[in-house]
Every structure is written in structure tokens, then in C-alpha cells.
Amino acid sequence: MSLHDAPIAVDIAHPTGPLSPAAPFRESRNILLLQGLMGPLFRRLGRGLMAAGHRVYKVNFNGGDRLFWRQSGGIDYRGTLADWPTALAQIIADRQISDVILFGDCRDHHMAATRICRDLGVTVHVFEEGYVRPDWVTFERGGVNGHSTLPRDPQWYRDTAAKLPPVPQHRQIASSFRRRASEGLAYNVADVLTRWYYPNWNNHRPWHPLVEGMGWLRKLRERKARAAEAAALMARLQSTGQRYFLLPLQLDSDAQIRLHSPFAGMAEALRVVISSFAAHAPEGTRLVVKEHPLDNGVRDWQLLTVDMASRFGVADRVDYLPSGDIVPVAQGSLGMVTINSTSGTLGLSMGVPVIVLGTAVYDIEGITFKGHLDSFWSEPGGPDHQTFEAFRRVLIDRCLVPGGFFSEEALDLVVRHVIARFEGRPIPPE
């Protein structure tokens, strides 16, 4: 039975075109891309891999996926989640897939795909936001974060890093919130308009795409006022010299919260942190809650933060930072409380004490605070610089590439470095 007429409803959207010349460093491989970020990352990567001589296919699960692919090798999957493992195994067999690339390994279709690939001996490569921020992207074999196979032994990192050359010179990469919001809006609109064609698609995110799209529009409309509010808060903190701890919020829909933490969502985490701060933080200290830069604006986290602070009697000691660069606010903090955000490694790189409340790849003895949250406020300690730098060096060698997702320069860097690492070639200079 062919894929086209199979009851599991996999349709070929675009046949694969002629192959480019073979890659100079490795034989041609057959690569399957699953869901990527909302934007052109996988289209750009697909083009680069094809130009390097590989055969590339891409599964589109909805109209947003298809909108940002728009080239040969597309496969529309219109079946159910229950039928997906059978469909994927068929795609892998028919196209002799050697490698699968996906963004985020905790989405429902991706978790099933990882299991199938493991059973079939197919290598899985996972994209995520960078473990180390800013200007790095995670590209790791097998799984990321809570699913990473990296050890938690500090001595292993010190021994391994000692055998590696220095980190190549790295520079800041441009990024655009407007671009991120616009791409998210376009993706969601395309998803909504094509639900008739993808009847079994169920977004892993908890909101209807139109609701999320309206949230992005609201954030775009209010960005100047929010930036002014953030600037005023930072100026006040710096001019008065007030001591504060930092809680960077994570995305409420993020699988790192749902699957790799003890919390059902960020609201519960916010309650736990603020209640502990109210009961145990030294007098005269404050708590700054920073909104995630990619939050879609559907939920009013500022209002929730104010309500929580009032409930626990610390409304006059809790501030909300709606936007802005996390670097200066982290650098000036007494310590950072995080579930498992990559903001944690940013703080650690500046010597800021960090406590992890969930599961994180950097939650290692000698790097993060290992006591209870109630004790952190009074005796946060600090990271061992040598151990953290060894950890960072190994991460860059094993599973990080420079670049980002929200500018042309950032995408170019990611694609060039990922293809080089994929083919086992020396990493090209930035």
C-alpha cells in the first residue's frame, strides 16, 4: 500500500526535486524534518542540506508548517496522533531515512517519533533554545534538557573540558521581537485557515491559534509602553541600589514546565516562589519577576504577580519587569530562582547564584544551589567558576551552535554551523 492511499492519511505535498552535488565530507543522507519553530528555520535548513547533497523531506502537520516550508520534499500528515507512529515508520522505511531533525522533543508527535526512531536505529537531532545564552542554539543528539544524556558529574566536565581547545571567538547576534511576533501570527493564521485540510491536527499549545494571535497583536501594540515601564523600573533599581532576587518566568505552555518540573504551570511556580520569598527573604530585599520575551500575551502575568504578592503581604517588595534585556537585571541581582530556564546559565556565567526548582542540564553540584528554596534567600552561595566554565565548554563542543532564530544573520549562522556539525566537518568561522 502506498503512502498516498493509506488510511493513515499521509499525503505527498511536493515531490522531491533533483539532487544537488554530493556533500564533500560525508555521503548523501536521507533526512526527515518534523515540526520546527514557527518561522523559516527548517526551510532554510532544508535548502542548506539539499545544497550539500542530502535528500530532505519535511512532514507538515498543519497549515503553519506548510506555509513556512514551501519547497520540494513536503509530506502532509493528516492522520491522527494514534496513527502517527505507524505512519512515521512507513515514511522512514519508504524513504530510507537515516536522520530525523525536530524542534523540541516533548511535543506529542515528537515524543512518539523519538521512540520509533530509537527502535529503528534512526538518529534523532533536537533543536531547542540555547542552553547557554545569549546567541547560542541547542542542537543535540537524542534529546534535550530533561531528556539529555549529558552527565551531572562535575568532575567529568572538568576532565573533558581540559582536553578541548578554547572556545572560538563569539559575538552578539541580532534578534527581532517584531519578527518573532509576526512569524507567530502568520503561522497561527495559516493553521486556522487550513484546519479543514488537517482535520486531526491538535496543537500542543493550550490556546486556540486565534487567541494566541490576538495576544501577539496586543503585545506588538503595547511594546513601547511596556518598554518604558521596564526602563523606569531598571532605572529605579540602579539609582537606589536596592537589593533584589530575580525570577525569570518561563512559557506556561513549555514542556520543560509540564514534564520536567514539579509544577503544573507557571502560576503554581509563581505562588511557591512568592510565598517562600515572603516568609524567608531578608528584610530590605526585593523580588523582580521578569516576563519571558516570547510570552504570547494571552495571560496577564503582571496582574497575577501583583495578586500573588498582595496575597502574601509583600506587594511593596515585588516588582514586575514586562520587557527588556535580561543581562543587566540578572547581573545586578543577589540570586536567580528558575524552574529550568536557560536564563540560569546566563546568571551562572556572571557569577550569580542560581537555584533550580525543576530538572535542568546545568543543575550540577558546585554550579547551582543545592539546598531548599527557603534557605536560598539568606545564603545563596555562588557557582564555582572553574566547574561552570568547564561545563560551558563541553556544551559548546557537544550540543551548541552560534546563532539564533529571529534575524537573517542569526539563521545563516545556525544553518551553516548545523550542517557542518551534521556532516562532521570543522565548524566554519563566524
Image (spheres, helix red, strand yellow):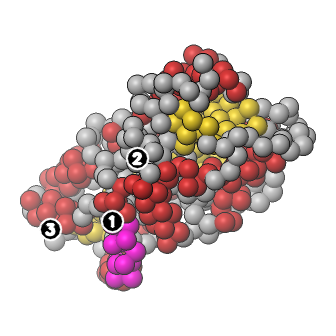
Count numbered badges in the picture: 3
Residue pictured at 49% horizontal, 51% vertical: 63
**Can you say which quadrant of the picture contains the N terminus?**
top right
- Residue 410 appears left or right of 153: right
Q: Which residue is mark 3?
A: 315
- Above or below, 18 against 189 in this view is above
Task: Choose mark 1 or mark 3, whichever is in front.
Answer: 1
- Above or below, 251 against 88 in this view is below
Residue pictured at 57% horizontal, 35% vertical: 11
Question: Is residue 36 shown in magenta?
Answer: no
User: CA gap, disc 3 to disc 2?
Assistant: 48 Å
Residue segment shown in magenta: 214-226
Toward the viewer: 15 or 140?
15
User: CA gap, disc 1 to disc 2?
Assistant: 24 Å
The amino acid beneath tag 3 is Ala
- Where residue 392 appears, x then y in whole percent? 60, 46
**Other-residue count near label 1 (Cα within 10 Å), few / some / many at <14 / 14–19 / ≥20:** some
- Answer yes or no: is residue 248 visible: no
Q: Which numbered circle lies on residue 196?
A: 2
